[in-house]
Image (spheres, rainbow, N blue to C red):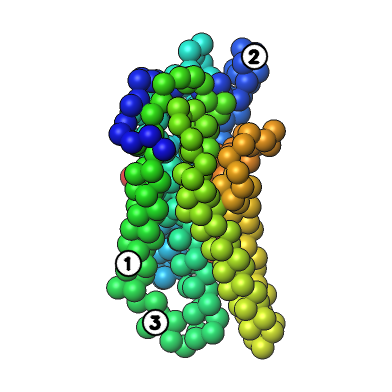
């Protein structure tokens, strides 16, 4: 690999999801709805949990933080994608591309670590119900959340440190709607085989191993539920199944993208849309639709806002 940054490419051209103008307008409306739903849904979770004292428990503290990550994560790619749907020239500067890669992997890595924290929270709630509040106290919850952000930062800074020295002297066309390592790495004017192996080890194997650990954790939890009473078992199982759905929606596309050689595949953009755009929107929908406490709290918040507006 060449030493030093010999970059002469000042910007990258994004091919986006389509080159057809009519289809781009349709996609703009679809993804505008998706992003608006993502913002409103996650903000609603954050506001509801913050304003309702009955939801000031470890699980909802973690759920609120997941909403923060989802909101930030979708904002890394969606606004730029929406603007590009309405523009003929879809470009991003070299600096903007590197910044997008950093925040994308910072928040994506944080999400991966955070989902394991939520699995740990469910394990403690089911295995040690009488000591749950004591074990998952505020200090522990804050510490776990900070650890996930730090973990995401370390993961991302390693990725960026490997990318920045690469020379880019053309071509500069990225067959995607945002900057990500597999596509950008293919444009480097040097042999990147060793670097690709390091990236797969960092991102791909991390996601794959973490996914297995989280699935094993929930399997253990579901086995433990067999000893619980009917109503409590159904409620806990419903929560765990919800978490497994969310985990699968995030991890499976990530494994497809990062745990293999960075050669282009037809399904790459579909997988990317799944975990960058759709999952942050579906998370609040899944959690609220399957959670009676959250639905009740949202109704209380709505009534409170209606009463306040009449005064």
- Image spot of residue 229 (x, y percent): 66, 86
Is 212 or 262 nearer to us in this picture?
A: 262
Numbered mark located on residue 20 in the image: 2
Spatial distance from mark 3 to mark 1, Cα to Cα? 13 Å
Disc 3 crowd, CA 10 A, few/some/many (<14, 14-19, 20+): some
Residue topped by disc 3? 135
Residue 135 vertical placement versus 272 (above, below): below
> At x 55% / y 57%, what residue is drawn?
205
**In this picture, is 266 found above or below 158?**
above
Residue hosting label 1 = 142
Distance from Cα at disc 2 to Cα at disc 3: 55 Å
The mark tally for this picture is: 3
**Is 173 rendered above or below residue 229?**
above
Of tags 2 and 3, the one toward the viewer is 2
Check the picture and name the quadrant holding the C terminus: top left
Q: Quadrant of residue 93?
A: top left
Front label number (1 vs 2): 2
């Amino acid at each position: 690999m060449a030493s030093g940054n010999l970059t002469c490419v000042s910007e990258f051209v994004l091919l986006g999801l389509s080159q057809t103008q009519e289809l781009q307008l349709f996609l703009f409306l679809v993804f505008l709805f998706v992003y608006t739903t993502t913002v409103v849904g996650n903000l609603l979770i954050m506001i509801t949990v913050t304003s309702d004292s009955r939801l000031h428990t470890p699980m909802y503290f973690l759920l609120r933080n997941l909403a923060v990550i989802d909101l930030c994560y979708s904002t890394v790619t969606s606004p730029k994608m929406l603007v590009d749907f309405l523009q003929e020239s879809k470009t991003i500067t070299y600096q903007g591309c590197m910044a997008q890669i950093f925040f994308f992997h910072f928040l994506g890595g944080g999400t991966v670590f955070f989902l394991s924290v939520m699995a740990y929270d469910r394990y403690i709630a089911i295995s040690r119900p009488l000591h749950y509040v004591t074990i998952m106290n505020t200090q522990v919850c804050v510490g776990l959340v900070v650890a996930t952000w730090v973990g995401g930062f370390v993961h991302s800074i390693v990725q960026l440190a490997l990318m920045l020295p690469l020379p880019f002297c053309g071509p500069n066309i990225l067959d995607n709607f945002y900057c990500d390592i597999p596509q950008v790495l293919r444009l480097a004017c040097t042999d990147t085989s060793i670097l690709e192996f390091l990236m797969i080890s960092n991102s791909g194997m991390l996601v794959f191993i973490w996914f297995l650990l989280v699935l094993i954790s929930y399997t253990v939890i579901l086995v433990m539920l067999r000893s619980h009473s009917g109503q409590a078992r159904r409620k806990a199982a419903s929560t765990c199944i919800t978490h497994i759905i969310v985990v699968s929606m995030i991890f499976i596309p990530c494994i497809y993208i990062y745990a293999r050689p960075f050669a282009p595949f037809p399904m790459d953009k579909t997988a990317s849309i799944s975990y960058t755009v759709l999952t942050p929107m579906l998370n609040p929908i899944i959690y609220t639709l399957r959670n009676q406490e959250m639905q009740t709290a949202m109704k209380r918040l709505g009534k409170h806002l209606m009463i306040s507006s009449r005064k």
